[in-house]
Image (tube, grey):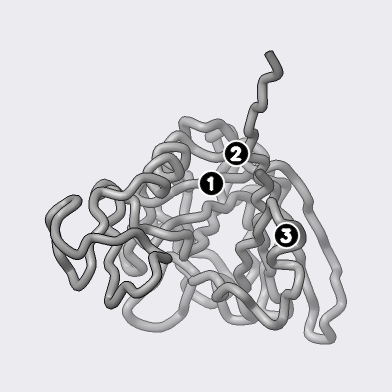
Amino acid sequence: MEHDGIELIVNVTILVKNREGRIVDRRDGHNVLTNIGRTWLSRTIPAATFATGGNPVPNGPNTNLTGDSGQVANVDSFSPIGGTYRPRYIGVGVGGTLQNITPPGPGSQAETASVPKVERSLQVNPGLPVQWYKQVLPSPDPADPAQFPTAYSSRIRGIFGYDDVSFPGCKDALDVVYGTDVPISEVGLYTSQAALTTIPGAAGLIAYHTFRPISKTPNFVLELAWDLKF
């Protein structure tokens, strides 16, 4: 009997662009889907209830599936444990086993499915309140027509601007202060379960990647894209 195995392949592309829009550095690599991410993905499929007009009773009166003809104000209730979350934020850090610049010094976290968080997360914005994530761009994004390059893949994309991360006083999760030249070496993709002003932990981390350090300064934009292929 033929076995139809469905494998999720997650690749990440990191581009560094100067103020003229020219790519001055690029990293391509496979991305690990964390155990948290695998659990999250499995819970996006089933629904807890199907209700029309907010009816919370499973299979109760006026219950319809999404797409049924004639339905009005249909509400699908997803799995209650994380099922309604979608990929929304990117967090970057200076940890990971490929970090080789001092400071911050070598990291210890390998790129495995069991990673609990970005090892040494970085503040993203220079204002208040301090934020630890960058929100991804909406889908579809007119500036990136390759978001859905095939019928079995999609792209999640985010951009760190000139002043993001590389600003005076930027700190990591250990309160180490950096200048305007920050050696980023790890990145995490988070769902909307994460909180912008909370130092990144395990909440919502669905993908993780480490790479040789990239120097983020105010002269460059950092563009990240995840390609999910089924």
Identify the image quadrant of residue 225.
Answer: bottom right
Disc 1 target residue: 207
Q: Earlier in the sequence, mark 1 or mark 2?
A: 2
Question: Residue 78 vs residue 142: left or right?
Answer: left
**Separation of marks 3 and 2 at Cα, in angstroms:** 15 Å
Q: Residues within 10 Å of mark 3 (few under 14, many from 20)?
A: many
Q: Secondary structure at mark 1?
A: strand
User: Looking at the image, which residue is at 32% across and 68% down?
Assistant: 197
Residue 205 is situated, as x and y percent measured from the top left of the image, at 44, 48
Q: Nearer the viewer, mark 1 or mark 3?
A: 1
Discs 1, 2 touching: Cβ within 8 Å = yes
User: Looking at the image, which residue is at 53% across and 52% down?
Assistant: 188
Discs 3, 2 touching: Cβ within 8 Å = no
Q: Nearer the viewer, mark 3 or mark 2?
A: 2
Image mark for residue 32: 2
Identified by mark 3, the residue type is: Ile
**Separation of marks 1 and 2 at Cα, in angstroms:** 6 Å
Identified by mark 1, the residue type is: Ala
Identified by mark 2, the residue type is: Val
Q: Residues within 10 Å of mark 1 (few under 14, many from 20)?
A: many
Disc 3 target residue: 14
Residue 74 is situated, as x and y percent measured from the top left of the image, at 29, 70
Task: From the viewer's side, name the closer residue of 153 and 13.
Answer: 153
Q: Earlier in the sequence, mark 3 or mark 2?
A: 3
Task: From the viewer's side, name the closer residue of 26 and 98.
Answer: 26
Identify the image quadrant of residue 167.
Answer: bottom right
Q: Residues within 10 Å of mark 2 (few under 14, many from 20)?
A: many
User: Looking at the image, which residue is at 39% across and 51% down?
Assistant: 204
Task: From the viewer's side, name the closer residue of 139 and 49.
Answer: 49
